[in-house]
Amino acid sequence: MKVFNSIVAAMLAAGLSGCNNAEPQSTAQVAPGAPGDTPFWAYSGKTGIGTSYEAYSNGEYSDNSATGTVSKVWFSLAKGMITETMFGLIHQAQIRDMQFIVTGEDFVVAEQQGLNNTVEYLSTDENGRPLSLAYRVTSEDPQGRFRIIKDIFTDPDAQTLMVRARFEASKPGLTAHVQVNPYVNNDGLNDSAKVVGNALIASSAGTHFLSLQSAQPLAESSVGFFGKSDRLTQLNSGTAMTSYATTGEQTGNVTMSATLGEIKEDTQFDLVLSYGSTEQAALAEGQKTLARGYDEVLAHFNGDGAHIGWQDYLQSLSVAQLYAATADGGKLLNTSALVLKAQEDKTYAGALIASLSNPWGDTVKAEQGHTGYKAVWVRDFYQVAMAFLAMGDNDTAKAAFNYLPKVQVRKSTPGNQGDSGWFLQKTHVDGELEWVGVQLDQTAMPIMLAWKLYQADVLSKEELVKWYGDMLKPAADFLVDGGLAKILWNDTQITPPYTQQERWEEQAGYSPSTTAAVIAGLVSASEIASLSGDTQNAERYLAIAKSYNSDVEKLMFTTKGTLKGQSADGRYFVRIAQDDNTNADTQLASNNGRAGMDKKQILDGGFLELVRYGVRSADNEAITATLPEYDDQTLEENLRVKYTFTDAQGEAFPGWRRYGNDGYGEDEKRGTNYAEDGENTDGQRGRVWPFFTGERGHYEIAAANLLDGQAAQQKFADIKYNYVRGMEGFANKGMMLPEQVWDGVGVNPFGYEMGQGTNSATPLAWTHAEYVKLLRSFNDKAVWDHYPLVEQKLK
């Protein structure tokens, strides 16, 4: 404590404004208003995410690694605010937001009110490429009365988020405040809070603790219940502020707040949010960070000098050789590398989540624990693992593969009463069951990844043989034989290649994208079985792959399509089919508020995966016959999938929706978020997903390789212009790539601009991974996650 107090004294001596500038307020013991207003998750359109870089020790995270203590703290930024810090496991949110408030004689303005804000990276190279996930967020009052400049990063050697807040005012008499809305242990209803000396403490169940501390003494520290007795509510009421020492015995949606002081010239405050399993531990973590100080913690975070940090991670990668493939000089590539690594759990090495966000979170109640997209889907997982391999991060790719048994269904899986070998739909990073639908592509992709890792010498033959017996053979057997999925709600007999769910998790049937993965998985399994000495199964897997392959067009390509558009001729791959007659008028199931339609009217881009994995060539007649409908922008709005956007220079680039009649998005009739009140509506509309621009770019690379000379060169130039530049055009101000972007259709109360990320999920790991893979493919002039073995064996 002597070190900590000396720092406080030094900062006060330097002239920083503190509690002495604040007006005295009345105080009371117990805050009224329990349990507070209904809690909701934070806005999902993040403009930044961050965590410290930690090195592996033998493929695991350990406090004994080269980077020392493993910091298990994550944060995100949205609308200029700090949102959803996580601690422990990557899905365990601890706050909804931390925001600053400025008051004057006649106004109260909080960051949530939509200040004009910019996002910068604190560490960049000479070309503006980010070198770490430390941010500076500048928020400016539209009336010009003040600015708030926040530097935000975590402490690599403590369980702490550090925030340096600097305030500038255009006139005297303005006061700065801070307010935190804790959601300790991943929900917003069961917390308590209290003032402890110069700190504020929030806790849940006596086992999870969060502290707010400052290098400068906090004035009028207070706790309260959100919407009832919190600081912002009191300030907005116009009545005298009452500070409360505790929320008492009742739990609820609580807040912690304090007055920072009068805003003078270059006023700044160093604040920390810190975490622990006891109150003392949480306080100690924050004090440790404050004792090290801003400069030392930031240097460690960045990897300056002798410190090991994010710069070291970037230098370990092969991204520099891909800069020439980019259209922005490599800025988004560096960001993508950092963002992908940041979305890995640090208790379970290799556990790669889909997004550090909760889709449409600000209208989703936070009354109980929720992972949102902070969870493992093996399909997204595969895309990210392949991106790590493309960047030269073999260690993370291998750690990811080694993690996979945790999410494979085995006899020992809790609640399993059926057959094993398949991979779970969605799980927590610790393997806890969440969604249990069978998606056959998610069972094939671990086999595909194994083959790629073996080819890249990341897995030795001995390791591959071991994993064949333990994990890959059961998966391949399930792709051949199917079986009974009986776990939790699911009690379904699976008969491949008919999948219970395709890659959008909504329909059963024969799916081009799922079947492409199943065939590639079985061909890869055949080769792995052969290397393992299992000749009988090697022959069986290949024979079944060929059988599935022979039925692709029969089951999924219609010759009597009913789409009406300038390019429609009735011949194209459908999204999914449930029977043996692809020309039948079969109705798809209703979902996401949209009534089911004739399968022949629904397009998606899944057929392109047949080319990506080597099941069909780029010039295959069925593939090329589908492209005109897929690209037809004259189709009726609900069935159309392609849209055109323009970048800042006014240049056009393409984007595609998941499929026609998609309902996974904002309501075009009412202007509400997806399932805003917990119910689907008939106006919900799935928007454009940027990673389809990358998927199409990969197809075009495959097509370019069928050309010679000048024609091939021109094709590659077009790919960079349309698809690489196009993906870069979807990035937001923090260079985060979204799940969905606004397509211009319907009511728009949110004020989204065309091509701007919506509140679905940003950053989406799959989108960043697709961008990285597109650059590697463009650089190599060959599709990165193509399987030449599949082409060879299917001939």
Image: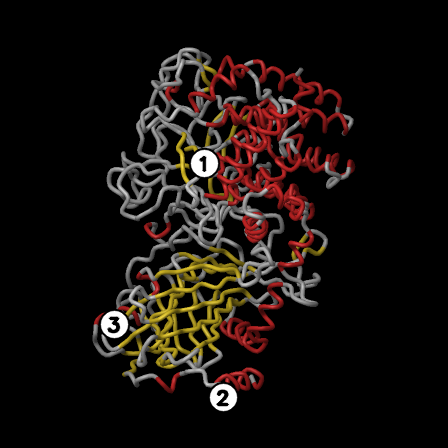
Occupied quadrant, residue 649: top left
| Residue at which label 1 appears | 653
**What residue is at 29 percent from the left and 66 percent from the top?**
143
The answer to whether residue 696 is left or right of residue 562 is: right
For the residues marked 1 and 3, what is the alpha-carbon distance in whole angstroms? 44 Å
Residue for point 44% across, 15% down:
579
Q: Which residue is mark 3?
A: 107
Label 1, label 2: how far apart the Cα atoms are = 56 Å
Observer-side mark, 1 or 2, equals 1
User: What separation in Å lies between label 3 and label 2 (alpha carbons)?
Assistant: 30 Å
Q: Amino acid at mark 2?
A: Ala
Q: Position of residue 465 (x, y in %)?
A: 75, 34
Q: Which residue is mark 2?
A: 13
Camera-side residue of 200 and 268 = 268
- Looking at the image, tell me whether mark 1 or mark 3 is earlier in sequence order: 3
Q: Residue 567: x, y in percent?
A: 40, 18
**Relative height, residue 737 to residue 609 (above, below):** below
